[in-house]
Amino acid sequence: MGLMFLCYLDDLSDREARGFDPWQEGRDSVFVVRKGDSVYGYFDSCPHLEGMPLPWRKDAYLDAAGQEIVCAAHGARFNIVSGACFIGPCKGQSLTPVPLTFSEDGRILARLEELTITPGRAD
Amino acid sequence: MNIIGPDSLVFGVDDIEACTQYLTDYGLESVGEGRFEALDGTSVVIRSKDDASLPPPLETATQLRKTVYGVADQKVLDDIEAELSKDREVKRLSDGSLESVDDMGFTLGFQVSVRKSLSMAAEAVNAPGAPKQRDVNVIGAEPDADPRPRTLSHVVYFVPDHAKAEAFYADRLGFVTTDRFTGVGPFMRPAGTEDHHTLFMIQTPPHMKGCEHFTFHMGGPTEVMQAGTRMVNKGYQSFWGPGRHIFGSNWFWYFKSPLGCNMEYDADMDLHDESWKAREAEIGADTSQVFLFQHREKWAPTGPPPPNKA
Ligand code: FES
Ligand SMILES: [Fe+2]
């Protein structure tokens, strides 16, 4: 498993986020956010309680204005571009990025082979 | 001080529409002006985070703006006003309620309680050897039941100084500590209720200060399961549960919410009076990790961690 197809850039509108379940576990474990023509990928795991997925319902990763990533459990807020938490229980910590590649035909692919850590593991 | 318990929690939220849908789906009744009521009239109130009528926000991410306590009568309100006025401002609002702050900076309100007395049966169970609670030919499982939250039960705060916070509620407002996690914080009940706790506080670094969760009492464990399943079926994501707590014995199921904190269903909490001696449990030296550790322990069964693909 090297590159994992997530979705097309055109599937996402500006300031839209979407979760994916690349390991078919029955719940999303990574998500992407589109901001302008850029897309950012992160593990769906809050640094406050590692392994805890962020949204209160599927794909609800952003605040109402689509400006920030939010963890619904205790309201931590993260910068979309850097993944850094700037207010909330994990202030100063960051989401773990998922490296992405964009194909010429507009596909968003996760470079899973580069992953050396997986949030949610206690070890 | 005959404080009965929380009458209302007021939030300044980011997404009114999402919160409205969420609180309605949770089972509260929308009665207008952002108020969502349980069967006894206790409530959650949501307003836009920019609403100038709200008390100022804490400096953290929390969206909780005010905890409003219901008290027995006007005399209790007067007593609270006299007590808190000794060292802080107490406002009398146009609706007759009081507004002040606790020692951690959480805004508090006090009003003559809006709680209506309920007359409803609890979940009835039978067990071999015990007198019958549910009669012959009365069916226990109702797949179509649509359980409603009965009353606002408790709120849980992250606080930067649990000892100081506990002392405020005990010494100034007459709350009693029913149990305590050493170095973490107390479970407290005000004098006007037998419930094990209406307030639980958890020691955290100051930047975490805020509401961890709050909950409404349901009619029994089955209602917790059915209401929680109703949430899952509507697409809401569980935070922790279902399960049963040790301190308080309440059944629980927590859900993440667009209010920036978790929202729980609970049922069948222990009741206590003055003869109860508070228990104390050690959970560990690193108090900021205790909470994490507990959750990881408990919530693992709801879904396996991602496999390590490295
Ligand atoms: S689990 Fe994300 S803020 Fe607490
Ligand atoms: Fe609780």
Image (cartoon, coloured by chain):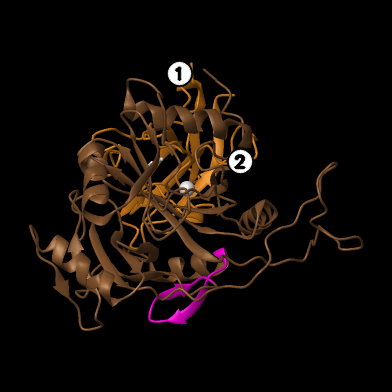
Chain colours: A orange, B brown
Position in image of residue B282 (x %, y %) = 40, 23
Q: Pick the residue in front: B120 or B293.
A: B120
Q: Which residue is tagged 2? A: B243
- Of discs 2 and 1, which sits in the foreground? 2
Looking at the rendering, which quadrant does residue B55 occupy?
A: bottom left
User: Which quadrant: the N terminus of chain B?
Assistant: bottom left
Q: Regarding mark 1 in the picture, which secondary structure is present there?
A: loop
What residue span does the magenta drawing correspond to? B26-38
Q: Which residue is tagged 1? A: A116
Q: Amino acid at mark 2?
A: Gly
The residue at label 1 has a CB less than 8 Å from ligand 1: no
Q: Pick the residue in front: B279 or B108.
A: B279
Rendering quadrant holding ligand 1? top left
Q: CA distance from mark 2 to mark 1?
A: 34 Å
Relative to B50, B82 lies left or right: left
Residue A43 is at least partly visible in this image: yes
B15 to B236, vertically: above or below: below
Q: Regarding mark 2 in the picture, which secondary structure is present there?
A: strand
